[in-house]
């Protein structure tokens, strides 16, 4: 579990983001070469611009890596005084990092489930459940039964207002499970 | 003369009962989003984007203009009363407004902010109406290589204006352009980067990108915040404001002077015309200039009404300036006008040199909306809502963000009736969230996406015209002009700046 959270932290950290973008750019570059050679019979092809973009992206990512390294070197030089902090502090920081990720992960998963079920459950059921779960995702601590009832009420009102806005005011059809 | 008649017709259209509610509604929505810490008027326009599919284009443009103008001045209310700028453009106002609030002069500070917003916004709108036809005529002189260099100039200035994060700005901009290359090629019937799926054949729509980058990513950012309300209850109790104190004393208005109001409006408007600058830069430049030329620079930072007037006048004038490159050249300089461009494109309209002539009837109500919003809505909203404003913007975060999530995602669906578009919005949201966490400017992603297709088209057309000879960009006078301009901007924004710091 710890190694998984470490992997997640690395992937979403400065190096992880650069590595992901680098991988994305390389896939993009390979796909661009698959379309056609950039110049054919002296004329530019559909892959010319994407290849040029990929090169610019690789250079820009190189610039980001250099800037990050320079910043890290500066931080290390300035942070030597604080190097003697205990491991306990490090563990607490790790826990805090994991806690900080709970919200975004929850919101992403809830949204993905909502999108997957939207057409199947229809607007009313899917949106009510999504709005209710989002009020829980933005809640602090464990909500009391009264707070849960209030959140359910809020979710119902949001669902109805959404229906009013889209279906009645803007006259667009929302999915229903019975059609 | 015809132009003036069209503008007056635009005012008449704006006052029609089916359009006016969009001005008022847009202004109120923009005020709310601009004032609530964590929300921006850009997010409001992003949420409006899906609705424009089923909305009259004039109404949509009027609503966008009202939201844009409202978002600029409403941030000053929370900046002054509780020292939390509702929008980044109100940061300079917080520096001067909050000390006044602590001295019991908060209402007066808000009055000065509203007056300056009113003057700056109105002068900006007038300058837009005067300058837009001239810019359009200038745009007609630019040929294909020049168009490429102009777009390249805009993108480069957007990147180098990301102070301290130029490489990251370049990454985000290039990523935006890369996303825009998905789908059918701009010049040949060839599909690119579809990975064999039919859903990507038509390319990626602006809407999931806007919703993802600005709404979904904001939800993810805010889910890390553990506060229960947008503004804490203690802050509401501390900010008591009476309506009768809003009117700024005449001697203080005279002390600020007509010249300063006009100068800050011109600064704000000019900054707005520049790509990538935005309201915060307009406010900062005008504030710095006002302090430099002030007879009482020692008052700055301790509650100077001149400082408030400069910052607020400039950021509202910026709104109109930002429309000039978008309408005349089809080049949006900031994310808000990029979304407005999206509204036009969704409705089958492409801004450019001919746009103002052919579509003035559509655009004139928007020009008038900027003017009316500045002259009427700014003071009216402050007078009516001012005393309760901090109470209004203090709302439960769980209710607020659950509502935004539903509007954003359902809006994404209703625009195209596509679950795939909703999924794309989530993907772009997560991507933008990760980029934002590492300091990559997400606005650059959108601007790269919007400008990318034109950049590619003009690049390839120019090279086709010259049989692949890139020297065409140096031999064409208009292209050379924009390349030289790029060099000048690069020198002043990147090269000279560090030198100045070294000497300091």
Image: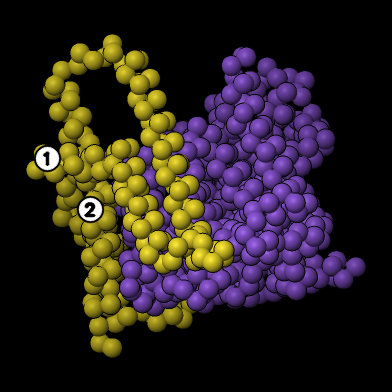
Chain colours: A yellow, B purple
Horizontal side of residue B27 vs B121, given as left or right: left
Q: Residue furthest right?
A: B1
Q: Position of residue B368 (x, y in %)?
A: 73, 62
Number of dots carrying numbers: 2
Q: Residues within 10 Å of mark 1 (few under 14, many from 20)?
A: few
Q: Residue furthest front?
A: A41
Picture layout, residue B109 above or below residue B379: above
* Mark 2 or mark 1, earlier in chain: 1
Q: Are marks 2 and 1 on the same chain?
A: yes
Q: Quadrant of residue B286?
A: top right
Q: Quadrant of residue B409?
A: bottom left
> Residue at 57% of width from left, 28% of height from top?
B95
* Chain for disc number 1: A
Marks 2 and 1, Cα distance to the nearest angstrom?
A: 20 Å
| Helix, strand or loop under label 2 | helix
* Nearest the eye: B62 or B458: B458
Q: Residues within 10 Å of mark 2 (few under 14, many from 20)?
A: some
Q: Disc 1 designates what residue?
A: A3
| Helix, strand or loop under label 1 | helix
Q: Disc 2 designates what residue?
A: A106
> Residue at 33% of width from left, 68% of height from top?
B195
**Dividing the image into 4 quarters, which one contains the N terminus of chain B?**
bottom right
Q: Position of residue B151 (x, y in %)?
A: 63, 54
Q: Position of residue B219 (x, y in %)?
A: 35, 52
Horizontal side of residue B475 vs B96, given as left or right: right
* Chain for disc number 2: A
Picture layout, residue B155 above or below residue B55: above
- Can residue B415 be seen at all in this image of the molecule? no
> Residue at 24% of width from left, 39% of height from top?
A10
């Amino acid at each position: 579990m710890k190694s998984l959270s470490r992997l997640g932290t690395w992937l979403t950290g400065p190096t992880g983001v650069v590595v992901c973008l680098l991988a994305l750019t390389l896939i993009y570059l390979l796909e661009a070469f698959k379309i056609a050679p950039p110049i054919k019979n002296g004329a530019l092809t559909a892959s010319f611009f994407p290849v040029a973009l990929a090169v610019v992206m690789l250079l820009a990512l190189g610039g980001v890596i250099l800037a990050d390294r320079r910043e890290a070197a500066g931080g290390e030089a300035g942070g030597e005084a604080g190097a003697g902090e205990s491991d306990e502090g490090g563990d607490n920081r790790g826990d805090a990092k994991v806690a900080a990720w709970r919200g975004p992960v929850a919101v992403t998963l809830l949204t993905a489930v909502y999108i997957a079920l939207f057409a199947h459950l229809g607007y009313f059921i899917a949106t009510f459940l999504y709005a209710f779960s989002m009020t829980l995702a933005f809640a602090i601590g464990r909500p009391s039964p009264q707070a849960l009832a209030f959140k359910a009420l809020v979710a119902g009102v949001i669902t109805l207002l959404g229906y009013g806005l889209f279906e009645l005011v803007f006259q667009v059809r929302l999915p229903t499970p019975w059609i | 003369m015809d132009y003036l008649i069209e503008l007056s017709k635009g005012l008449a259209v704006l006052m029609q009962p089916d359009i006016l509610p969009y001005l008022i509604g847009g202004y109120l929505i923009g005020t709310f989003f601009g004032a609530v810490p964590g929300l921006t008027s850009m997010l409001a326009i992003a949420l409006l984007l899906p609705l424009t599919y089923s909305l009259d284009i004039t109404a949509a443009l009027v609503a966008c203009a009202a939201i844009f103008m409202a978002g600029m001045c409403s941030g000053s209310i929370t900046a002054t009363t509780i020292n939390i700028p509702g929008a980044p453009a109100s940061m300079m106002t917080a520096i001067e407004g909050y000390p006044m609030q602590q001295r019991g002069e908060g209402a007066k500070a808000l009055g000065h902010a509203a007056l300056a917003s009113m003057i700056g916004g109105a002068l900006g709108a007038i300058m837009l109406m005067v300058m837009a036809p001239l810019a359009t005529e200038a745009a007609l002189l630019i040929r294909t290589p020049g168009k490429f260099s102009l777009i390249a100039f805009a993108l480069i200035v957007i990147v180098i204006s990301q102070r301290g994060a130029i490489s990251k700005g370049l990454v985000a901009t290039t990523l935006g352009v890369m996303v825009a290359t998905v789908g059918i090629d701009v010049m040949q019937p060839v599909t690119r980067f579809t990975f064999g799926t039919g859903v990507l054949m038509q390319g990626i729509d602006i809407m999931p990108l806007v919703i993802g980058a600005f709404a979904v990513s904001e939800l993810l950012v805010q889910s890390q915040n553990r506060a229960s309300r947008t503004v804490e209850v203690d802050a509401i109790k501390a900010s008591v404001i009476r309506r009768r104190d809003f009117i700024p004393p005449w001697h203080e208005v005279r002390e600020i002077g007509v010249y300063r109001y006009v100068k800050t409006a011109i600064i704000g408007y000019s900054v707005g015309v520049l790509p990538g600058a935005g309201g915060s830069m307009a406010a900062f430049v005008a504030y710095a200039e006002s302090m430099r030329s002030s007879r009482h620079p020692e008052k700055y930072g301790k509650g100077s009404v001149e400082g408030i007037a400069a910052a607020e006048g400039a950021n509202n004038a910026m709104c109109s300036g930002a429309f000039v490159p978008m309408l005349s050249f089809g080049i949006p300089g900031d994310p808000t006008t990029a979304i407005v461009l999206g509204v036009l494109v969704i409705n089958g309209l492409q801004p450019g040199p001919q746009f103002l002539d052919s579509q003035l009837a559509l655009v004139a109500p928007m020009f008038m909306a900027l003017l009316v919003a500045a002259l009427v809505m700014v003071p009216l909203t402050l007078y009516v809502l001012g005393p309760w404003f901090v109470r209004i913007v203090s709302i439960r975060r769980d209710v607020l963000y659950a509502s935004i999530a539903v509007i954003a995602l359902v809006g994404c669906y209703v625009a195209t009736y596509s679950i795939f578009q909703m999924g794309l919005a989530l993907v772009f949201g997560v991507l933008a969230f990760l980029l934002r966490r590492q300091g990559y400017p997400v606005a650059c992603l959108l601007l790269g996406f919007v400008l990318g297709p034109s950049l590619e088209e003009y690049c390839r057309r120019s090279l086709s015209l010259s049989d692949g000879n890139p020297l065409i960009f140096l031999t064409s006078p208009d292209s050379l002009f924009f390349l030289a301009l790029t060099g000048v901007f690069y020198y002043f924004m990147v090269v000279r700046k560090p030198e100045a710091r070294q000497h300091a």
